[in-house]
Image: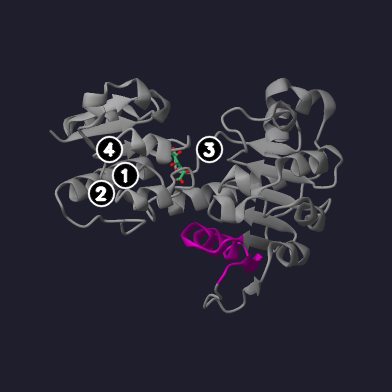
Amino acid sequence: MTRILAVGRYSDVDAAALAAMGAQALPSAAALAALPAALRAEVHGVAFMGHESFGAAEMDLLPALRVIANFGVGYDNIDVGAATARKVLVTNTPEVLSDDVADLAVGMLIAQSRGFEAGIASVRSGDWQRRGPLPLARRVTGRRVGILGLGRIGREIADRLAGFRCQIHYCARTPRQTPGWTRHGDPLSLARAVDDLVVAVVGGEETRGLVSAEVIAALGPDGVLVNIARGSVVDEPALIAALEQGRLRGAALDVFWNEPAVDPRLAALPNLLPLPHVGSATVESRAAMGELQRRNLSAVLAGQAAVTPINAP
Ligand code: 8YV
């Protein structure tokens, strides 16, 4: 028997679509060990959703596993090396969410720069009438913006900001055919050249802490940091210190070190605009992600090529 496990907290629509494929729901990978060994031995496919770790230990609980189909473009939580070593194919859901994540990044930069949160609070509380206007905000049009990671999502962000006549600087391993945009070899030289920085690089060990205390200092008291990628890319204690001491004007974060348990010191800061990892959380992106996840799963289990594979075991 070929069993599929739908691991994670799916929307009702996706849970129903996975159930229609015969998938058994499991709230988290941590619950794998509690399944009977005879059932685990029949699992060929995992539809994975979430950001908990899925590594060698989890894979070893599923000796017949052939595919892990991730619901998401980022897969830093999945040990792809361990999967390849066990001849397990890993797939993700690229492209289909890039527009929504890029929209969110630009929206967060504008919301942070123009003080949306303080403005909304002032209207709701009556302070607008009682205390009068807020301190002036800063404009976004024409700023020098750095994009850390010019992959699919980074490119969409840069294209949008170019429409705001921003000067685009970026840091990427390979130069891109983007006349007028300036490439930098490392995050520090990028941060030194720009006003604001948007993090759009992949997560995982290779990018851990790239936005260091030094990079944050280079942005300076007029800078805004936006992160829609992974919390691990930013040195969070250094960010908290800079925001607390006014050494960085503001940050807008959709991702955090230990999400969803956000550091209360960070969450309390008035110059932080936080969102609960909603970059891809639109009806449109999530429908496309779910469909692509299921197409990958079905293809591999039917012995066909995956649509968007990550590894080649
Ligand atoms: C999540 C994401 O996958 O695609 C990614 O890499 O981080 C998100 O789209 C989504 O929140 C489901 O966990």
Residue that mark 1 sits on: 69
The answer to whether residue 91 of the structure is visible from this angle is: no
Disc 3 and disc 2 in contact, CB within 8 angstroms: no
Q: Quadrant of the N terminus?
A: top left
Q: Which mark is residue 277?
A: 3
Residue at 31% x, 38% y is 47
Q: Position of residue 284 (x, y in %)?
A: 36, 43
SS state under label 1: strand
Q: CA distance from mark 4 to mark 2?
A: 20 Å
Query: Residue 167 colored magenta?
Result: yes
Q: Quadrant of the C terminus?
A: bottom left
Disc 1 and disc 3 in contact, CB within 8 angstroms: no
- Please name whichever residue, 26 or 165, is drawn nearer the observer in this view of the structure: 26
Three-letter amino acid code of the residue under disc 4: Pro
Residue that mark 4 sits on: 63
Q: Which residues are magenta?
A: 148-173
The answer to whether the beta carbon of the residue marked 2 is less than 8 Å from any atom of ligand 1 is no
